[in-house]
Amino acid sequence: MKRLILVSFIVLILTGCGSGNADLTWDDVYSMVEDGSYQSNIDQAISDIGPETHPASVVLIDYFSHCFSGEYEKAWGLIDRNSPFMTDKGDLESFANAWEQNENEYNNLSIDGLDIEEEIADTRMIGVFFSIDVYDASLMKTYNTKGQFEMSNVSGEWRIFSSKPQS
């Protein structure tokens, strides 16, 4: 009998039953934000789902992937039109030239967290926190840098709206 109980308990743990958050969706997290849930509960839900799985995070990962592989037009297409980020970068040609002239190498991009804002007029903003290892060719040194991209769904799809360095 003890063996059956132990096996049942292990099965429950392995299948995620009993965790309470196994079936959370991003809509559930949005509801928590709108309902004013404690930030710690929202952060735990985001952690349980995995911040890298949010569609805004996927867009950011795709953006970096396109930039690193020289597909600048695809990366440019992931930026919200007339956003502060696009205004800062100028035009596609300037954007591409800046990446081409950059001699740094980038590795180990990770999505570290999300800051989900309340929805206003059918638009939601999400801060996507990331870290990345940068090899600075001029210094011959690797360091880890952190940043944040503010993502918007104003166009109906997640796009980059602005960016902020963290460290």
Image (spheres, rainbow, N blue to C red):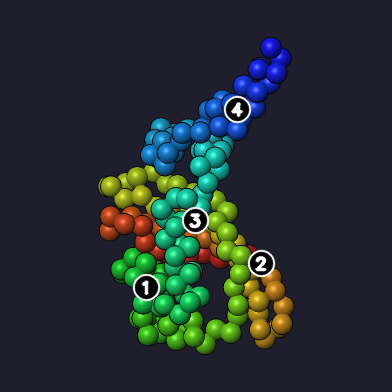
As measured in the structure, the alpha-carbon distance from the residue carrying label 3 to the one carrying label 2 is 17 Å
Query: Disc 3 vs disc 2: Cβ atoms closer than 8 Å?
Result: no
Above or below — where is 68 with respect to 114?
A: below
Q: Report, in whole angstroms, how far the alpha carbon at label 1 lies from the one at label 4.
A: 44 Å
Instruction: Assess whether mark 4 and mark 1 are in contact (beta carbons under 8 angstroms).
Output: no
Amino acid at circle 2: Asn
- The residue pinned by badge 4 equals 11
**Amino acid type of disc 4?**
Val
Tell me which label, 4 or 3, sits earlier in the chain.
Answer: 4
> Which residue is labeled 2 in the image?
144
State the separation of the CA atoms marked 4 and 3: 34 Å
Element under label 2?
strand
Count residues near mark 4 (Cα–Cα under 10 Å), then give few for <14, some for 14-19, many for 20+: few
For image coordinates 30% across by 68% down, the residue present is 81
Residue 152: quarter of image: bottom left
* Amino acid marked by disc 3: Val
Quadrant in which the N terminus appears: top right
Q: Rate crowding at label 1 as few (under 14), some (14 to 19) or many (20 or more) other CA atoms within 10 Å.
A: some
User: Residue 22, how many percent across, how many down?
Assistant: 51, 33
Label disc, if present, on residue 128 of the rendered structure = 3
From mark 3 to mark 1, how far is it between C-alphas? 20 Å
Of tags 3 and 1, which is closer to the observer?
1
Dot placed on the residue nearer the N-terminal end, 4 or 2: 4
Measure how far apart labels 1 and 2 are at the Cα level.
Answer: 26 Å
Left or right? Give the position of 164 relative to 28: right
Q: Quadrant of residue 85?
A: bottom left
Indicate which label's residue lies in the foreground, 4 or 2.
4
Q: Which mark is residue 74?
A: 1
Q: Position of residue 48 (x, y in %)?
A: 54, 40
Callout 3: 10 Å neighbours few (<14), some, many (20+)? many
